[in-house]
Image: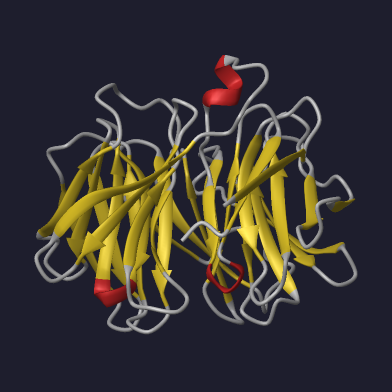
Amino acid sequence: MYYRSFQAHNNSSINSLCLIKSTNFVLSGGGNDCLIRLHNLNNDSVQSTTFPKEHITAVNSIDVSSSGETFVSGGGDTINVWDLVKQCKLMRYQSINDQIRDEVYDCKILNDSLVVSCGTNCFVNFHDLRQPKRTKPIYSVKAGNDNLNSLDYNPISKVLSVGSLDGRLTRIDLRNQEVIRDTFECGGLLNVRLCPRDMTLITFENGKLKLCDSNDLLINSEVTLSNDKLTYRIASDVIKDYYSDTEYIMSGSETGIVYLWKHNPTDQTVSEFKILEPPLLQYTDKSRILSVVKFIASSNRLICSSENGLLHIWENVL
């Protein structure tokens, strides 16, 4: 395993990361500098490009379309649509419902027509890409009584899952126009990921990661990330080895460590696999916050963001 890192954002945290499918490129969104940057991870000497500054607050979320030609970015009450090739903004939407201000925490491109976002105003907001002049949402669903921290979408089942800090998971079935609300007794939901085998992985505020059945939400497996209450929206995900069906749970942390657990779906057991710790020269509080973690299966590469603007890269992880 080989480790390297580079300064992706200067004097700024990294609030969001998004992989560009089938490439060595990754997009990052800055917290303090409000910038979007494109990085080529192919060589040790990383090449980075800065997009025009269109956000005035932190870029909390980025999502690339399936074609790889466009992407969306969310921050403040703004969702911007970008041309990735020309590196210019195409459209701008506002996630405002009934004059309630918002701080967008997550956004996704659902298809060629729809963009969805969620944040502090407790509404899931839908925008129509075919109506660029209509900046307000075309449809909104209230999905909690506290911050909506994370959302994910299953393009096969057409179900959108949204996690709230009030402990509620809201599932919106776009096919049947049905809204299902469930409440967990584990505290606030910080991150929600829809995973293979119709499973949902949830990061809870109390430091627990729970892998559930996406249909009935029965707990399949559980691990403890932290015994202390989490402050940041720490991301986790289920990943697979490119050459086998071996399944792993990965997560960032607030302690300067990236965790990997091996998961056995048959007997629902989880065992510690690897602990990745950047060899930081200055172990400050900001450098310990490893909030966003991504895995590129084709190159066996794991990348992770930190609050001090560094992007950490591990090669040959699995």
Q: Is residue 203 visible?
A: yes
In the image, 302 versus 86, the foreground residue is 302
**Residue name at image x 39 percent, y 51 percent:** 250
Give the farthest residue toward the front.
1
**Which picture quadrant has residue 131?**
bottom right
Q: Position of residue 71 (x, y in %)?
A: 69, 66
**Residue name at image x 63 percent, y 25 percent:** 280
Q: Position of residue 17 (x, y in %)?
A: 62, 51
Q: Position of residue 92 (x, y in %)?
A: 74, 58
Vertical comparison of 309 with 215: above or below: above
Q: In the figure, is residue 158 to the left or right of 38?
A: left
**Residue name at image x 9 percent, y 65 percent:** 267
Q: Position of residue 125 (x, y in %)?
A: 49, 58
**Which picture quadrant has residue 218?**
bottom left
In the image, 20 versus 275, the foreground residue is 275
**Residue name at image x 12 percent, y 38 percent:** 185
**Which picture quadrant has residue 247?**
bottom left
Q: Is residue 144 visible?
A: no
In the image, 165 versus 192, the foreground residue is 192
Query: How many marks overall?
Result: 0
Q: In the figure, is residue 189 to the left or right of 130?
A: left
Q: In the figure, is residue 67 to the left or right of 187?
A: right
Question: Which color mode does the image show?
Answer: secondary structure
Vertical comparison of 250 with 282: above or below: below
